[in-house]
Amino acid sequence: MKQVVNRLVVAACAAVMLLATGACDDARRQGDAAGRQLLSVWGDTAAMHRAGDTFRAQRDSLPWQWQRNACNRAFAAVLNATGRDSVRQAMYMLTFSPQEFAQFKVKNMLDSIYTGKFVGDSVIDYFHLLHGLGEMFGCSRSVAMMDSAVDARVKMMSVNDQMRIYAYASHPPMLALALAKEAAAPDADTILMRRRLEALKQVYTPEEYATFTEEFNRQKQQYENLRRISQPSQ
């Protein structure tokens, strides 16, 4: 009797394993097909949006987490194999949760900016790419969490490190505009602003700093004039 029970248990386990293997294979096939479908319509924004929605709906409808993981991995493998950065960023958005996406992107991105590996137009274009993909695929929450995480991490840095990040991540006139608006505010922290300007002098070349200073002074004067005009007369 005991041997019969053991055989039944072994048979039941084998059946469960076969079912699980089949379900996992089905999930992988779904992910692979969804990835290929997205690539086939890449460049058509409306079709890309539909393909992303279809993938997520199919994945999220799977009953078990291990099936959803298998679907995610297969989808990611197809997109990752292209070697194209824009496709890879879409892969991260569509397979990571908003929290995972923010955590994954922020550290690597800020470290690359801080070390000067990622500067100027490349940083600006990269942020535009991420925001564009987020809007296209309905992943704006992922991008918003990334932006918040960037701001939070930068605020924890020293003034010198903050200015290093900002200087590498934007052009001098763009940064001048942002800082001038803050400097012209009635409650501006003049000591902090002076420290920021001194820090930028250490990061920028003399030519870049001259461009920054000229634009900063011009924009600051404009903001101050606008504030005076908008104040009610006594």
Image (cartoon, grey):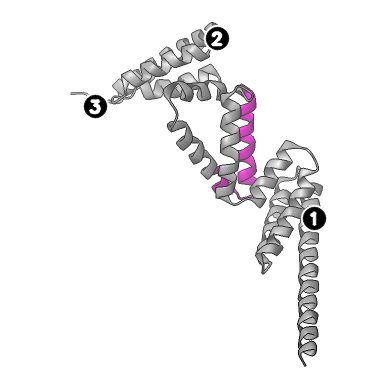
Of marks 3 and 1, the one in the foreground: 1
The answer to which of 12 and 37 lies nearer the viewer is 12
Q: Which residue is mark 1?
A: 32
Residue 80: quadrant of the picture: top right
Instruction: Inspect the image, locate mark 2, and give the three-letter code of the amino acid beneath it.
Output: Thr
Q: Which residue is mark 3?
A: 232
Query: Dividing the image into 4 quarters, which one contains the N terminus?
Result: bottom right
N-terminal of the pair, mark 3 or mark 2, is 2
210 vs 94: above or below: above
Instruction: Inspect the image, locate mark 3, and give the three-letter code of the amino acid beneath it.
Output: Pro
Q: Main secondary structure of the magenta part?
A: helix
* Residues drawn in magenta: 121-144
Alpha carbon separation for disc pair 2 and 1 = 49 Å
Label 1: which secondary element: helix
Q: Which residue is mark 2?
A: 205
Residues under numbered marks 3 and 2 in contact, where contact means CB atoms less than 8 Å apart: no
Q: Which residue corresponds to the image point at 77% horizontal and 84% vertical from the top-left? A: 6
